[in-house]
Image: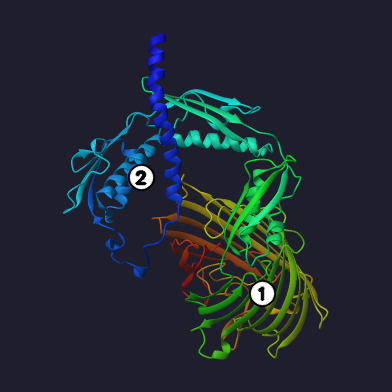
């Protein structure tokens, strides 16, 4: 019996070295997959925008190959993973450099496929690679091949059986850490990813206790091929609990280094926390002046027992400009342009000038187009690292169906990030407006002073294309008209929720509800642009902007008056068909009432389907919808285009 155990241990020692290499290879393989590589070409909607040159021109002694990947001795469930891990398959159309390049790529292929097997707990799997009929294990380091034709490479994978965890030992100064809490349990998942994930989670738990130097002192992994089990031993060195020390910043040139450390907001003397390190990085990236940010504690304590923190940044270009366009079958087309500076005075102050023209095609007279211009200024960190000061000047001339409006407004305010999910903002605004509507056909002037306040709670995993989480908004805006003395308060609330139906987030159910009320004044005392309207690409699709709600028949057409309350609801099923394409069936409903609270006597419903083209900067959206209970004067359908999901 002892002899058998000794033999198993000796055999395990051989396997152990291989496992260590392959566990590392699994990490390296995952890292390589996430690494951004230079783009060789780029196509959008079938049009090649750059690239496409002869790749052989960039390779010395170019040699091509053919590859045969034999997966007949693997489970069908592994085929996709192994094919994705194969760089020989992925790069078959790309030449390599000489016979040495062929041999190096073949050896790398085996490492990657073994790592992929280990990620599925297949520790007795084998990967055999032959080049031109010869095994790579038998080839000399300087082997030469006949490169007068593509060199044939054959890769044969035998997955073997799936292992489970055997004995699990976690030692060292780990306090009350129990391996079972992290999935390390006899008979459990023995994949390399599960082991490495548990190891990282234990390290994380130790660091959350304030131990910045916590590390893995030793890891031993032994595969028993007779029992198909994997024994795991991990030893941790937790290190002392330590406070934060000094923060050092490197890489800044035009951005003030002292300001960068201030915005990192790592408080000296506070007990170390990995969350504070992560929050500092996110806060610095959010400034918009850095291309990359690394925030990391050092690997040893200062003499006073504190842990210093290093911040490494690289600055991005500060000036920017751009143009954009919108299109709607009911509201016409629009164009916009902007110019900005991200670091105006050296402390991430942002200045943006923007202008837009809309309703193009909706009207034939340029005077009836909508024009908007704005100057926007933002200064972060004004009353603490979590704050932003904002100031704006806006000029608007617009002519929707409900009114004609010429206004000049300015406002200053503060927004504060209470937590990573909660933001509170407030402004003081002054607006001069000249309005013409059905109640005042000769026009009426207003001088409005308001204090809009907004609270947002946002747990979405992605702002432009969420797959889980929810968002809630509460808005209140007390307003007084200095000319008439009329006062009113505008209240609005909105909530949306997102949930993936399948396991990989390719099918997402999304819902939104919104409601609002204006109290304190009659409908005709409320400026027409402050009343509630519904309809359009951002609310109830299938209807034109402002088409839903009270209206008056005037001069041969229906003219919306707006209301003092509204309610809306939307539901979508976002189905990602391919990596870059999705379809979205949806239904929207909305109502607007002259009363202070919605009476739901006139609810309008629209339904349709949209397509999404997924890009790195968010999905491109095109929606087509029809009104299900349209009134006289309503369009028979609507088409809307934009960037990002509808909500």
In the picture, the disc for residue 275 is: none
Q: In the rendered view, does 101 fall on the left or right side of 236? A: left
Name the residue nearer the viewer: 108 or 81.
108
Q: Position of residue 629 (x, y in %)?
A: 51, 68
Could you tell me if the residues under marks 2 and 1 are in contact, i.e. CB atoms within 8 Å? Answer: no
Q: Which of the image's four quarters has the C terminus?
A: bottom right
| Residue found 54% across the figure and 71% down from its top | 536
In the picture, the disc for residue 376 is: 1
Residue extending farthest front: 142
Give the class, few, some or many, for how many residues have Cα within 10 Å of label 2's Cα (few <14, many ≥20): many
Q: Secondary structure at mark 2?
A: helix
Give the class, few, some or many, for how many residues have Cα within 10 Å of label 1's Cα (few <14, many ≥20): some
| Residue found 79% across the figure and 71% down from its top | 520
Q: Position of residue 410 (x, y in %)?
A: 73, 78
**Residue 478 appearing in the image:** yes
Name the residue nearer the viewer: 262 or 433.
262
Q: Secondary structure at mark 1?
A: strand
| Residue found 77% across the figure and 82% down from its top | 447
Residue extending farthest right: 485
Upstream in sequence: badge 2 or badge 1: 2
**Residue 561 appearing in the image:** no
Which residue has dot 2 on it? Answer: 85
Q: Which of the image's four quarters has the N terminus?
A: top left
Q: In the rendered view, does 346 fall on the left or right side of 124? A: right
**How far apart in space, not on screen, are marks 2 and 1 (Cα)?**
48 Å
């Amino acid at each position: 019996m002892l002899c058998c155990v000794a033999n198993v241990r000796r055999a395990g020692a051989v396997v152990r070295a291989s496992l260590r290499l392959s566990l590392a290879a699994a990490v390296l393989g995952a890292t390589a997959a996430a690494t951004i590589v230079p783009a060789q070409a780029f196509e959008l909607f079938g049009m090649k925008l750059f690239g496409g040159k002869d790749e052989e021109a960039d390779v010395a002694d170019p040699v091509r190959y053919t590859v045969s990947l034999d997966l007949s001795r693997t489970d069908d469930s592994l085929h996709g993973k192994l094919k994705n891990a194969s760089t020989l398959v992925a790069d078959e159309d790309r030449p390599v450099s000489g016979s040495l390049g062929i041999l190096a790529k073949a050896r790398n292929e085996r490492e990657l496929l073994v790592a992929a097997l280990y990620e599925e707990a297949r520790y007795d799997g084998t990967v055999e690679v032959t080049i031109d009929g010869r095994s790579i294990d038998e080839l000399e380091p300087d082997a030469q091949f006949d490169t007068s034709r593509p060199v044939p490479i054959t890769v044969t994978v035998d997955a073997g059986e799936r292992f489970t965890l055997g004995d699990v030992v976690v030692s060292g100064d780990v306090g009350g850490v129990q391996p079972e809490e992290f999935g390390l349990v006899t008979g459990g998942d023995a994949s390399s990813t599960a082991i490495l994930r548990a190891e990282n989670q234990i390290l994380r738990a130790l660091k959350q206790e304030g131990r910045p130097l916590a590390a893995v002192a030793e890891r031993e992994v032994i595969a028993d091929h007779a029992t198909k089990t994997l024994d795991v031993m991990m030893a941790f060195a937790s290190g002392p609990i330590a406070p934060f020390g000094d923060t050092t910043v490197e890489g800044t040139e035009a951005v003030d280094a002292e300001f960068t450390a201030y915005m990192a907001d790592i408080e000296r003397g506070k007990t170390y926390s990995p969350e504070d390190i992560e929050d500092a990085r996110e806060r610095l990236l959010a400034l918009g002046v850095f291309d990359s940010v690394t925030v990391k504690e050092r690997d040893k304590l200062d003499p006073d027992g504190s842990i210093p923190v290093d911040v490494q940044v690289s600055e991005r270009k500060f000036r920017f400009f751009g143009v954009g366009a919108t299109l709607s079958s009911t509201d016409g087309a629009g164009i916009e342009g902007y110019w900005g500076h991200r670091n105006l005075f050296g402390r991430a102050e942002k200045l943006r000038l923007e202008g837009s023209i809309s309703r193009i095609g909706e009207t034939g007279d340029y005077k009836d187009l909508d024009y908007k211009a704005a100057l926007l200024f933002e200064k972060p960190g004004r009353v603490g690292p979590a704050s932003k000061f904002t100031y704006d000047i806006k000029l608007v001339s617009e002519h929707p169906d409900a009114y004609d409006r010429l206004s000049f407004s300015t406002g200053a305010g503060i927004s504060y990030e209470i937590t990573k999910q909660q933001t509170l903002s407030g402004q003081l605004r002054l607006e001069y407006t000249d309005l013409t509507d059905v109640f005042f056909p000769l026009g009426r002037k207003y001088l409005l002073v308001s204090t809009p306040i907004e609270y947002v709670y946002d747990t979405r995993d992605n702002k432009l294309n969420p797959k889980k989480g929810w968002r809630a908004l509460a808005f209140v805006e007390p307003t007084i008209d200095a000319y008439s003395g009329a006062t009113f308060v505008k209240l609005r609330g909105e909530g949306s929720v997102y949930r993936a139906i399948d396991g990989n987030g390719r099918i997402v159910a999304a819902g939104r509800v919104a409601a609002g009320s204006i109290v304190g004044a009659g409908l005709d005392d409320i400026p027409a642009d402050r009343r509630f309207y519904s309809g359009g690409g951002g609310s109830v699709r299938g209807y034109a902007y402002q088409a839903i709600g009270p209206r008056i028949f005037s001069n041969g057409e229906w003219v919306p008056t707006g209301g003092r309350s509204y309610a809306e609801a939307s539901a979508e099923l976002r189905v990602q068909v391919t990596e870059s394409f999705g379809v979205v069936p949806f239904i929207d409903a909305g109502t607007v009432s002259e009363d202070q609270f919605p009476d739901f006597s006139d609810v309008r419903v629209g339904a349709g389907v949209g397509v999404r083209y997924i890009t790195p900067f968010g999905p491109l959206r095109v929606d087509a919808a029809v009104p299900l209970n349209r009134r006289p004067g309503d369009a028979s359908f609507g088409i809307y285009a934009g960037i990002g999901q509808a909500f």
